[in-house]
Amino acid sequence: MLKTICLNNLFGVDLMAEAPEIAKLRLFLKLAAQIDDVDLLEPLPDLDFNIKTGNLLVGIADKEDAENRLGAGQLDLGGEIEEIVRIANRLADACTQFAQLQTSDVESDHLSEKQALAARQLSARRLADELLYRKREETETFDDWCESHRPFHWFVEFPHVWSNGGFDVVIGNPPYIQKKNVTNYRWIGYEAQNCPDLYAVCMERASTLLNDQARFAMIVMHSLCFSWKFSELRRDLRSRFSVLWVSSYWSGRMGLFSGANPRNSIVIGRRGSSRLSSQESKRWSTRCNRWLSESRDTLFEGLRYSHALALVDDACSRGQWAFVDWTLSHSIEHLVERCEPLRNSLAKSSEFALGYKTTALYQLGIYVQEPPTVDPGTGAPAKTNSARSGWLYFKSDFQRDLALVALAGRWGYLWWLTYSDEFDVTRTTLAAFPGDIERLAKLATGDMELKSLLELSRTLQGEMPKNLTWMKKAGVNVGRYNMLKLRHITDEADWLLAQLWGLTREQYEIAGNLRDRMVFGNKE
């Protein structure tokens, strides 16, 4: 059974010549491990037509791919591509027969059959290489270009797969390499061409190799979800799949890969018609899962997805993929749909400034008075590094003070987790926060709850300088306000805000529990 699966169902390609050999060896070892008696060991399958060396990004998938991607409808292929397609169609039957020979009891000369098939495939490969080389108008010699680019023509290399419309499943872990560092070959014709990392065009290319009912899964860096630099890739993936599931992960000490610590997202896609109604989303999401090293073995068991509605994705930066926790999704949707963003209350400059630290982990650094920086030798104030702080300017002190309590507690922190890279705090993310500040500020003088909220804000401003933590950076002691010690104030403010925004007590409690899990449940 495993031998049949290897020959008929498993295919792969890698640019590194040693990678296919390692993959074949691992499959051979897996097959051998199933046999208790060495006398029962059958001949190992020949997987040279299944696992190959080549460049995912350079080559022709099929005639349609050549016409649409390489020439934008202008590539004059003449009859050359038609001839290669006819050869590939004949190769499809030959590849299928060669695989069947290896699992049958019929005596045959496998070596001669392989040599004949390899020669026919080499001829078709050469024709496709020459066609692509001419149409790309390369300046290298043909042989040098083939050596540097390793073109891979899918309908020629796996013709029996293409005769059935493409792959049923594609999975992969593309390289995490900045595009500017790839200098030995070039690719053309991709929607994600301008994305800065190589994994973007690899994902796009892999998504074009599927049949109409296929599945897709890739593990990539989670910049895919939040960075504006990958907006083209996000649009392309949404257009190619009827449903997407996106889960994301980060650990302070280790990553999903042993020995590495990138922040990852796993993207699963399904082709075919979607069963979702027009009111639902074609994308499902988890929060960015923080996890401890001891929970690696159970990390995926606890995943919960929720709909990521377009209005939520578009709330912070148009086209961003929010990290949506299933317990918080309805609260976020409610706020985005009914409340105005903070940016509506901002001015270009004013005396009513609200500061924020530009990095965060377990709390947001939000303040009216910037925390001190002290020379440890003299105790005197040291020069402040302005790059560590950003500022938001409001039209009134009411607006600023309401924004302080809205961002300093659970609501601001969870909003940041939903839309951030879990490190940088940006003006864009904070300005998008749906706090309805301008409306609330207009009611502040006549509403008792709002008066209480403003009093809490001013109490918080008075208590923050009394609760400082220190970290030495560049030879000076840099202060941060320890907001965890002021939760008795921010929690009370959070509940008043929840009522003013139309959220329930249950939603308030759920948000607090999630905040606590993300803060206290994720420290090694």
Image (cartoon, rainbow, N blue to C red):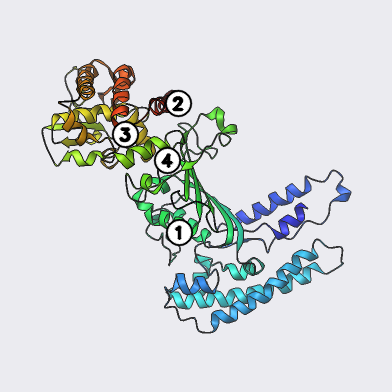
Which of the two labelled residues, at mark 1 and mark 3, occupies the earlier sequence position?
1
Mark 1 vs mark 3: give the one in front: 1
Residue type (three-letter) at the residue carrying disc 4: Phe
Q: Comparing marks 3 and 4, which lies closer to the viewer? A: 4
Task: Give the residue number, with chain letter if any, for mark 1.
Answer: 239
Out of 400 and 76, give the one closest to the viewer.
Answer: 400
Q: Is residue 395 left or right of residue 340?
A: left
Residue found at x 38% / y 52%: 230
| Left or right side of 156 for 220 | left
Q: Is residue 474 visible?
A: no
Tell me how far mark 1 sits from mark 4, CA to CA. 20 Å
Q: Is residue 354 above or below residue 213?
A: above
Please report whichever mark, 2 or 1, sits nearer to the chain's N-terminal start: 1
Find disc 4 in the rendering and name its residue.
323
Frontmost residue, 472 versus 491: 491
Task: Report, in whole angstroms, how far the alpha carbon at label 2 lies from the one at label 1.
Answer: 35 Å
Q: Circle 2 sits on which residue? A: 517
Query: Can you tell which mark lies on residue 34?
Result: none
The residue singled out by tag 3 in the image is: 359
Residue visible at 14% across and 29% down?
397
Please report contact status of discs 2 and 4: CB closer than 8 Å, yes or no: no
The quarter holding residue 519 reads: top left
Three-letter residue code for mark 2: Arg
Q: CA distance from mark 2 to mark 4?
A: 16 Å
Q: Disc 1 on helix, strand or loop?
A: helix
Disc 3 marks a residue whose amino acid type is Thr
